[in-house]
Image (spheres, helix red, strand yellow):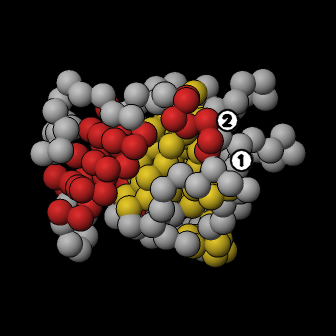
Amino acid sequence: MIIPGPSIARTSTLTLRGLVRVIEEEIQLHDGPITAETKNAIHHALAAFDGNMNDLQPFVHFDRTRNYTRNLVATDNPIHDHPSDGCWIRHIQGIVNEVHYESDGEALVESANALISHGVSYMDNSLGLHKVGNPSEDVDAITLHLYAPPFDQCRLWHDTPDATNATIGHCRYDSEYGNY
């Protein structure tokens, strides 16, 4: 169940600027780890985001030579963890495939596999690991990810049979604030 936070009414829609404002307010209200109440408020705010492409267009950059680009808006990728209190994914356009994994101590085992065409999903390390990708070669997919708090590196797995073989990935962006 998602409970709206104090900054947004249940029936409201949010522009990108409004979404950033609500998330910043929610996070600033709580010093320290993000509480379940704040996670619910953030989830609700992302669900209320109107996904207006006019707001997002300055941040949408595709590179046809790569399957995945990261474009910083405010402050098929490898399987990765989340060294933060959580990762929210707001679907905007197209279809994405989200695959969850759990470690059995030796291998990474697929625990869930979903095609997502709308809404908000959530992931943190207590739920396992995941990867997100676009299953279509013809239709661009756009998702908005929120990592709270932000991080600059995470663990990556390229080989599911060996759960102990993780590398450190340093997060970089293909664009920042709409600029290359």
Q: Identify the residue shown where x is 71% and y is 47%.
A: 68
The extreme left residue here reads 6
**Which residue is the site of mark 2?**
134
Q: Residue visible at 30% across and 28% down?
A: 13
Reading the chain from its start, which is encountered first: label 2 or label 1? 1
Q: Secondary structure at mark 1?
A: loop
- Residue 46 occupies which quadrant of the picture? top left
- Coordinates of residue 128 in the picture (x, y in percent): 44, 57
Q: Is residue 60 visible?
A: yes
Q: Are marks 2 and 1 in contact (CB under 8 Å)?
A: yes
Q: Residue at x 18, y 29 (%)?
A: 10
Q: What is the quadrant of residue 83 in the picture?
A: bottom left
Residue indicated by mark 1: 68
Residue at the right extreme?
A: 65
Rendered location of residue 49, percent (x, y): 37, 33
Residue 113 lies left or right of residue 11; in this view the side is right
Quadrant the C terminus occupies: bottom right
Nearer-the-camera pick, 120 or 52: 52
Amino acid type at mark 1: Tyr
